[in-house]
Amino acid sequence: MPEKNIIVTDSAVIEGASKEHKGIVSRVIEYFHQSNKRQLTRRPNFAPLGGPYYTSEKGFGIGLVIAGDYSTCPSDTLLPTSNVSLTGTLATKKYYSVGIEGTHVYPRDTRRINYKLDFMSFSTYFWGIGFAMDNDDANKTKYGLFDITLSSDYEWRLAHNLFVGPAIEMSYTNAHSITDYDLWEGEPLRYFTISAGVLLQSDTRDNLTGPNRGHFFELIQLFSPRFLGNEDHSFSSTELSYNLYLPLWKGGVLASRFHGKWTYGHTP
């Protein structure tokens, strides 16, 4: 009788051995591969994203985002996904920033909370106050700016895609390393502001963080009166945003964005 070669393997042993010999690159690739298959739960599932970049204002830098998504009702497949992101950026032109931002969507999408907290420090330029000063390049002077901004809003859904609610913003700015104080015309170099107002949104996006279709319209009207602690002057701001997403082909989306912010009164 001819001999038979019988090979017996233990899949658990082989799998365990292969994991022991995987390098760091293979493990990172496997992590991202498995993260795309994860199930949505009530607790955020985090994944890191990052890479180098260049801008004329910041120079060469590297950014890192640790993004997490979750659901307040995982069984509801039509409920928009809530999200939270931790961000960090470091660039060559004395720029760094760290922050956290996200959107919390309540069950049945009856309410939403948006929040954002940023710490930034960078080197920038100042031309003076008013159009005549800003229009003269000879006034260009360098200075350092440190900024902390916290903004948040609480929205109720009025209709299918329409939301409205109160909004608040707190900001602290500190100008330093100034080479020409005359351009500031006696304005304070440190300023703390508290603003409150109302927010209106129309949102038909199919995804809050990576939309393929739909639009996003947002109007934020904030007031910064003196009795809220805004130094000796009061001012107001109006912020308007409109984003439109049109699918072109599978995996291809045309995205457009309009954004403007206007302030009036004695703006710091």
Image: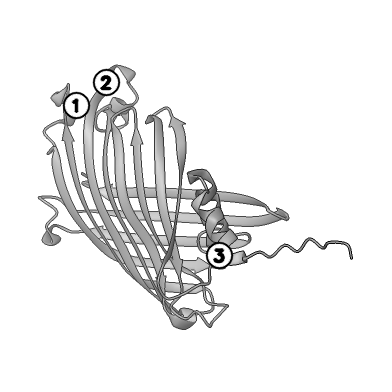
Which residue: 43% across, 78% down?
72
Residue found at the very far front of the displayed protein: 1
Q: Position of residue 89 (x, y in %)?
A: 35, 41
- Label 3: how many residues lie within 10 Å, few (<14), some (14-19) or many (20+)? some
Instruction: Report the residue at 56% width, 54% height from top.
Output: 18
Side of 10 where 81 appears, left or right: left
Q: Is residue 40 left or right of residue 197?
A: right
Residue at the spot 48% in from the left edge and 45% down from the top edge: 24
> Relative to the observer, which residue lies in front, 241 or 135?
241
Q: Which residue is mark 2?
A: 139
**Where does the image place residue 234, in percent across and percent down from the top left?**
18, 53
Dot placed on the residue nearer the N-terminal end, 3 or 1: 1
Q: Do tag 3 and tag 1 residues touch (Cβ < 8 Å)?
A: no
* Residue type pointed to by label 1: Leu
Q: Which residue has dot 1 on it?
A: 183
**Mark 2 neighbour class, 10 Å CA radius: few under 14, some 14 to 19, many 20 or more:** some
Query: Is the residue 9 above or below the residue 126 in the image?
Result: below
Q: CA distance from mark 2 to mark 3?
A: 45 Å
Q: Secondary structure at mark 3?
A: loop
Question: Which residue lies under the disc numbered 3?
Answer: 207
* Percent position of residue 251, x then y: 68, 53
Q: Position of residue 1 (x, y in %)?
A: 89, 65
The residue type indicated by label 3 comes to Asn
Q: Residues within 10 Å of mark 1 (few under 14, many from 20)?
A: some
**Number of marks in the rendered image:** 3
Disc 1 element: helix
Front residue of this view, candidates 28 and 16: 16
Tell whether 205 sits left or right of 85.
right
Which is closer to the viewer, label 3 or label 1?
3
